[in-house]
Image: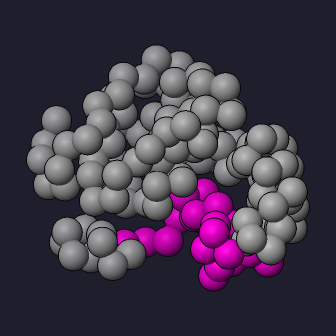
Amino acid sequence: RQTAEALGLPAPQVPALAALDVGRWRGRTLTEVTAAEPDAVASWLADPAHAPHGGETVRELCDRAGAWLEDTARTPGRVTAVVEPDVVRALLVRALGLPEPAFWRLDVRPLTAVDLSGRAGRWNLRVGAPLGEGP
């Protein structure tokens, strides 16, 4: 929300675009969790349908973000969404038809724009543009 507001954009909360719910791991770094629960982290990173933290699976995140993308594709005009990097990865997995394990292979740089254009079923991707730079 702070980033959207800093850009002068409205910042409504859209539940479908919320960050991945990591359950009881919330507020801890991946390094901390890995030190405490290495097997749980390994299984979480290997299996998009696994959520040892008791929160949401990567598959669930991809499904809800993908559903938002498909719904939004039916809206005329451009849509700007300011989201966390994990949501960008989920949107890319669904838009590009990538296998879910690719989620962890997509690096999304903070404060950059990712542009998806086209329509449901046929998305084009533009990555890495600095914020504020148009298509």
Front in this rendered view, residue 5 or 51: 51
| Vertical side of 49 occupied by 74: above or below | above
Residue 9 in view (yes/no): yes
> What is the x, y in percent for residue 133?
12, 47
Q: In which quarter of the image is the C terminus?
A: top left
Q: Is residue 22 magenta?
A: yes
Say above or below: 52 vs 94. below
Whether residue 91 appears in magenta in the rendering, the answer is no
Q: Residue furthest left?
A: 133
Residue extending farthest to the bottom is 27
In the figure, is residue 74 to the left or right of 29? left
Count every numbered label the image shows and give the total: 0
What residue lies at 33% left-to-right and 59% top-to-bottom?
110
Q: Can residue 77 be seen in this view?
A: no
- Locate residue 118, reporting x and y percent: 36, 24
Pick the quarter of the image with the N terminus.
bottom left
Q: Which colour scheme is used?
A: one colour
In this picture, which residue range is highlighted in magenta?
Answer: 10-32
What residue is rendered at 60% in x and 42% in y? 104
Where residue 100 sits in the image (x, y, percent)?
A: 68, 33
Q: Is the magenta stretch mostly helix, strand or loop?
A: loop
Residue 111, above or below 43: below
Q: In this view, does 65 lie to the left or right of 119?
A: right
Where residue 83 sits, quadrant-wise, is bottom left
Left or right of 126: which side holds 61?
right
* Viewer-nearest residue: 104 or 73: 104
Q: Residue 42 location in percent, x, y?
A: 79, 51
Direction from residue 86 to residue 62 in the image, left or right: right
Viewer-closest of 7 and 77: 7
Q: Which residue appears at 61% of the width and 32% of the height?
A: 102
| Image quadrant in which you'd find residue 16 | bottom right
